[in-house]
Every structure is written in C-alpha cells, then in structure tokens.
Image (spheres, rainbow, N blue to C red):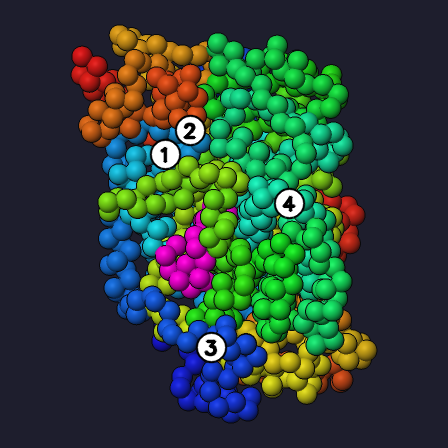
Amino acid sequence: MPYILNTEADIKEMLKAIGLNSLDELFRRLPGQIRLKEPLKIAAGLSEYQVKSAVAALAAKNTPVDGFNSFLGAGCYDHYIPAALPSIISRSEFVTAYTPYQAEASQGSLQAIYEYQSYICLLTGMDVANASMFDGASSMAEAALMALRITGRDKIVVSGSIHPEFRQTLKTYLSGFDFTIKNVGFDEHGFVDTGSLNEAIDGRSACFIAQSPNFFGLIEDAAKIGRMIKEKGAIFIMVANPLSLAILNDPASLGVDIFCGDGQPLGGALNFGGPAFGILATRNEYLRQLPGRIVGKTTDRQGKEAYCLTMQAREQHIRREKATSNICSNQSLNAIGAAVYLSLMGKEGLTGAALRSLEMARYLHECLKNVGKVKIKFSSRFFNEFVWEIEGAKKIVKKLYKKRIIAGFLLGEFYPKLKNCILSCCTEKKSKGDIDNFIETLKNVIC
Amino acid sequence: MNNKLIFEKSSPGRKTGYFPDSGISLAQAQELLGKDYVRRDLPLPSLGELEVVRHYTNLSRMNFSVDSNFYPLGSCTMKYNPKINEALSSLEGFTNIHPYQNEDGVQGALEIIYNLEEMLREITGMRRFSFQASSGAQGEFTGMLMIKKYHETSGNKKTKVIVPDSSHGTNPATASMCGYETVVVKSTRDGLIDLDELKKVVDGHTAGIMLTNPNTIGLFEENILEVGRLIHEQGGLLYYDGANFNALLGVTKTSLMGFDVVHLNLHKTFSTPHGCGGPGAGAVGVTEKLVDFLPAPVVEKKDGTFYLNHKIKNSIGRVRGFYGNFTVLVRAYAYLLRLGREGILRVSQNAVLNASYIREKLKDYYELASTLPCMHEVVFSCEKQAQKGARVMDIAKRLIDYGIHPPTIYFPLIVKEALMVEPTETESKATIDYFIEAMLEINKEIDANPDSVRNAPHSTCIKRPDEVKAARQPDLRYRY
C-alpha cells in the first residue's frame, strides 16, 4: 500500500497489543448508521509511474506563458527566477517542517523568517512586518481590520484603482459587520480623484487605502494623499508591488501607516495565481494590532543569540475569540523564498530588475504611441504597466493571441467604461525584440 | 555553526547578473518619473550566489522536518509528503500559467481542480467545493460566512456560534471575524461534548456549531447525530473543522455525520507539505442548501471544456485573489490518484492503529486524558510528571534529544499538562516503538534526575530561548 510502512505482520502484532481482532474494530465507537458499507466510488490506486503520466498529461494540456510573447501582468508578474531559488527552497528541511513553535528544532526557518521580515522593513521603510499573509488581497483586508481596531471608527475609504479582486476580498472580509465601504474614483489621468477623496474621508473614516503603482500601473502622489488623510486622523494604508519599491520612494517616507501587497513579484512563479504570499508591515505603534505570526530575536539560556515566535498573545491559539485574526497557517515557504530571492538579487539585481521592467514598459509605451488608432489612456507616470485604448480591443486581443501574443489584460471585465482598454506589462524578461514583434503584429492585425 | 544574518555577509559591489542590464539608470528613472517619486537609496545587501546558497543550506540544517525526524505533532498530521507530488506540482505546465490567460491555455489546470473536487465530494458526501481558501482558518472563515449569509438570506436573526471548550483557537477567532458571539460548551469528564450543557445554550439565536471530529482529545464524538439534531432543530448549521479528518477517510462521510459545511486541510489529510507553516489549502465543501453561497469562481464543465463560473447567485464574494493555492491542489490530486479507494481507507486505519498502539503502550506511565478509545491521536496529561518536577514542556524538549519533534503540548486547554501525539499512518512500527521507548526513558529520567529533563534539549544548536525577553524587548528585524 503506498506510503504505509506497517506490514500485515506489524498490523497483527499491534492489534494484538491493543486487544483487538481487526482494523475495523478501531472504529467501534462510530454509530453503525454512519459507517460506510461500500467502498468509495473512486478509482483503484495507481502506481507512481501511472500517476506521473496522468498528471503530466494534464500539465501538457496547459500552455505556459513562456510559450507566448506575453504582456500580461495585472497583479501576477512573470519575472525571471534564478535557478538557485527553487534549488534552495525545495530543500526538504524547509518544505517538510511545521510552523516553528519549537524554537530549538526550528532555528533555520526562524532565522530565515526573521530575515524575510527584515527585508520587508528595509524595502518599505516600515518598522515591523509579520511572517506573511495568504496573499495581497487578504493582506489588504486584514490591514483594513487593523485600521478599524486602531481608530475605533466604522468606515473604510478605498481607491477605485486598487486591484478589483483586492477590493472584492475586502468586501467579503468586512461582510460580518456593519461597516461602511466608500469607493473613491480615479480622475482622467488614472490617479486617485483627490476631490472625491476629500469629500469621502471624514471623522468616521478609519483609513484610506490606495494602491501605488495602482492597478493601471500609475505611481500615485502618495505623499500628498498621505497628508490629506492625516488631517482627518485616519490611517493611511498602501498597497504596492514590492518590486517597484526597488526604485520608488519607500512607503514609510510617504506617510504610510500600514503597508500591504502581494509578494509574488519577489521570486514567485505565476502558479495560476497561487501560492504566493501577502506582505503586511506597519509602524511600531501598531505592532500589537498586527495579525499573524512574528519572529523575534532573543537569547537562549546560555546567552546565545536565538530566534523564536513572539508576541503570541495577539494570536488565535492564545486569545481565541479576542485574537487580532483567525490566521494560523500562512505562506511561510513563499516568504522564505522571497528572502532568498532578495539575497540572490541583491541591491544591484533588484534595482536592475525594476529599471529594466520600467525601461521595457517605456519602450512599449513609446512604440504604441506611434501606432495609429492606439490611444494611451492615462498619465505616463507608470512603473511596469500602463493602459492603452483601441477600438475593438477584445477582437484585436483575440487575433494577437492566435499569433501567440498575449497583449495584456482587458480592463472591461472589471471596468465597463474601459471596455476598449488594455493593461500591458513588461518585466525584465522582455527584450526590445519581443516588443518590436508585438508592435509589428499589432499593426498587421489592425489593418 | 555560523549563523550570522545574511545582511552581515554583504560586500558592496557584488552582482549576480541574472538578466541583461537595464539600459536606463536610476538618474534617468528620476527624469522619467519625477525626482520626488524615486528613492535615493535601497538598503539591501550585495551577495554572491554561493554565499546565499550556503547560508540558506546551513539554515535548513538547523531544522527538524518530516524527512529527517519523526514529527508526532497532534492535530497537525505531519505525514510523509510524497516526492512525486513535489515533482509534478513543479512542472512548468503548472507553475508558468497565468491566472488571467485564456481558458483554452489552462484546461489541464481547470481539469485538475474539477477532478479533485469530484473526489473530495465522494470522500465527504458534500455537494460542491471551493478551493479558494489558503488554509484551514481561511476555510473556516469562508464556511462560516456562507452560514451567515444563508441565515441572512432566509431572514433569520442569528447571533451566536457554539464551540466546545476543546476546540481549536481558530474556531472562536473565526466566529468573531464573522461578527458572531462565541458560546463555549463544556465537555464531559470523558472529553466528549456534554449534551445537557449543549441543550442549555442552543436556541433560536444559534447560527451553528463548529466541531472537529474526532475532537482534539482524539475521541470520536459518538453523539454527533444527536448534536446535529439539536442544532438543526433550532435552524442552526453544523460546521466541520477538518483538521482531524485523517482518522475517518473512507470510514464515514461528513454528510453522514450531519455536517452542512466542511473544510479539509489539504496540508494535513491530503499529504501536501507544511513548508515551515504554509502554504496550505482549505478546501471548503457544502451541502446542497449552501451551494449558492460559495465564493466565485468555481470550475464547471460544458461539452468537454472546463471553465471558471463567476456567476454564483448569493456568493459571499472572494476571500483572496485568483483561485487559491493551485499548486497545492496538484499535490493533493496526485496523492489521491496514487491512493485510490482502498489506499484511502488504509490511511485512516493505520493512523488510528498507530495512535491506539502508542496509547496502549504508554497508558501505564502517562495518564490518559480520557478512558475512551482514541482515534488518530492520543492525548496524555503529564500532571504526575509535573508534580515530580518535569512539566510537559520539559518532556517535549527532552524528546528533541532523541531526534523526535515534540508533540503538541498544552493543548487542548481542558487537559492539564496536555501532550497530544499524532503519529500518522506513514510511520513504521519501528519508529513508533522508538518513540515509546524514548517516552519511557524520559519517564524514568524524571524519577532519577528531573534536572536533566528540565534543562533539555542538550543536543541542539541553541538551548531554550528566552521568550519573555523576546516579547518584552521586541527585536523583529535587522537594522543597518
């Protein structure tokens, strides 16, 4: 039997020791009417070779993005992953370990998570980060819950140019309570409409949540937004692609109180959208409201440096119904992966990836500008993606797809008014050749 | 071992060069974007690949793991994580697909989700599943929000959720996140839900009850049908916390036990690895009456083609971005294909056998938390040992010196000096005998020299950390 080491002889001997005659008797306390009388209607087990063939055949039915000339981003980015990263992170000492509750037997994961927390603080300028959340969307929802607890207010103000799935998740997370969510739209340049923000944010508002670069790729004037929010005594929550922070101002310097985001761009594969991990970081003063696990540095009984899980009085296994969140398992392995990625890339590598993404996106932007019928939708203050508009976008995207080009993300799905708009992204994997190929094909498709 | 932080190994000027250099500089980026938007300095280290590889390889060697140690951590189901699942989940056809690419390019991925759902439906008897939740706790949140929306849609005012005093901390925490008041129901001396106590708290305001079965004392809640009747009579629903489902695979179904919503921890029962605490996956299954409340999207099949159905009438919405921890689902799927129907039953049989054997061999030395037979895990109370000067924490730490990861301790909260042992089905009798031997040795040692147990572990890279200092003087990050 696969994965079971007890032999028939072992089973017999163990049953005898317990004083039972059959495996069936182990379940004698179950009422008869709930016992299954028939075997499950599931196929018989397969050999490993058969499983491999069956699952590999399903993998082969998919078309990896690398088989296209892809400009698809929209919250999940196709960056280069150094070979050393999966090599380290697939070490079974990391893969098959549990949450490091037992510090003496888990110093490796604890130190790696401490390094992850440190990296997030260095990138964002925030004081503290937790050991990870599930993803960017749930991380943002937890940030909003933090703001509600911190301020005791009952209204969340949120920018409409945040990833729509993040906003949907926020709505779900707040649905158990009578809180109000107020959306603030974007102006003709694609930025937060500060006039509407000014109206929306009031003495009841716990926070304003903005994304920068926003869902359209645009870099918001976050410092200005931060000042507006502070005047009303609300918390400033910012969502960002962490890779953008290699070249953009750190959120702390912009007045951000809670930073959240999806960690996928830090060495995560696309994985059909998961697993990646969520980043959550804040200022020291809000540490006690930060949900999730946190690793701290301390000393052992002999004064030697040691790491352990700490501040556990916030967590569900201690505080139960009064906990900051119900989160228990998180996405540790992915967070450790991010620490490894940032170490491999280093200061120069990370800046290089961000700059090359920017460079390629700018080149695509320049090229598209010169294509007849194409209109650049918003401002040109973007990081790695931007929005362009063309009549019949859906059809054009379809035609390009047939020529193995994924032009980007059709915004109409989330923003009916932007139905002819396409969000296109470049990472450091793109070359000018890829972009020229895209532009040439686009020109052919249009005419 | 040199455990300097990675930041302390930096030498400015080192560069790894994984892709072509950018044609623009930071100064040019400032011109393009405006200098007010571009940062002046990025305080990250500069390292070489070998240093990074060696650093993290050495760190990994400071860990206990299933691949290197027996890991009888109660309620966590630290079973073997088959290598084939790792190999298959890292195929490019799964890792290099984008959540927003055309559905014709992800048919294999959708088929896996569809097929996995079919198998889990058969195993649990539930009508439909969602795979969006990334963990057990997020599965609970998803399931309890569905219960909430179900009541709201039916126009029923429900305010409270019942949990037994033996429940996982996530249960009451989840109820709070859904805006419910938590009501705790006591257990009997045997460790089962006290029906009389339950009757006192169930009323028309009861939204539901959250249960693990077997419960956290490792006992089958044999009055489950009566519990279900009491709750259902008042219009409440039954939530199944699947953390302990490993005991019941192929033996019964959650639908037969009367549950309306279940979550299954794929990283427990279905063999996907724990990865130092995640990623996991919480598959949430519901009966017919809750199907309309599932998070969108779900995978459907039409004319042989799979697609994402985003239109669910009364959906609670999404609990995260995209579709969940997909590559975790690939592992669980491969695992179930390999087991097949007879392998699935062998899991629960051997899990319960191994735990029952430990119970039998240790019961004369460590006091049992309950006289009732255990299922897949057994809980001892080490009060007697504590009186002799070695608390359960000390026993747990001493096990590390035997190369055994400590069992869960001080949980469930209703058992004093609790030691919760879950061996899982994948361990051999020889390993289990070794564990029993170690426990007996430690018991002897407590009589002879409790100090040696109190000062354990002796063999690890650090001694016990000062947790009070860690909490009082938080050092949570490196600073340059």
Q: Whole-Å distance between the Cαs marked 2 and 1?
A: 8 Å
Which is more N-terminal, label 3 or label 1?
A: 1
Q: Which residue is mark 1?
A: B100
Point 68% across, 59% down: residue: B163
Assign a secondary structure to mark 2: loop
Q: Position of residue B74 (x, y in %)?
A: 60, 68
At label 2, counting other C-alpha atoms closer than 10 Å, the crowd grade (few under 14, some 14-19, many 20 or more) is: many
The region drawn magenta spans B117-135
Which is more N-terminal, label 4 or label 1?
A: 1
Q: Whole-Å distance between the Cαs marked 4 and 2?
A: 40 Å
Q: Whole-Å distance between the Cαs marked 1 and 3?
A: 42 Å
Q: Are marks 1 and 3 on the same chain?
A: yes
Q: Nearer the viewer, mark 1 or mark 4?
A: 4
Q: Could you say which quadrant of the image residue A402 lies in?
A: top left
Q: Is residue B121 magenta?
A: yes
Q: Position of residue B194 (x, y in %)?
A: 71, 70
Assign a secondary structure to mark 4: loop
Q: Which residue is mark 2?
A: A74
Q: Amino acid at mark 3?
A: Gln
Q: Nearer the viewer, residue B414 or A216?
A: B414
Q: Could you say which quadrant of the image residue A273 lies in?
A: top left
Q: Amino acid at mark 1?
A: Tyr
At label 4, counting other C-alpha atoms closer than 10 Å, the crowd grade (few under 14, some 14-19, many 20 or more) is: some
Q: Nearer the viewer, mark 2 or mark 1?
A: 1
Q: Which residue is mark 4?
A: B156
Q: Which residue is mark 3?
A: B349
Q: Chain of mark 2?
A: A
Dots 1, 3 in contact, CB < 8 A: no
Assign a secondary structure to mark 1: loop
Q: Nearer the viewer, mark 3 or mark 4?
A: 4
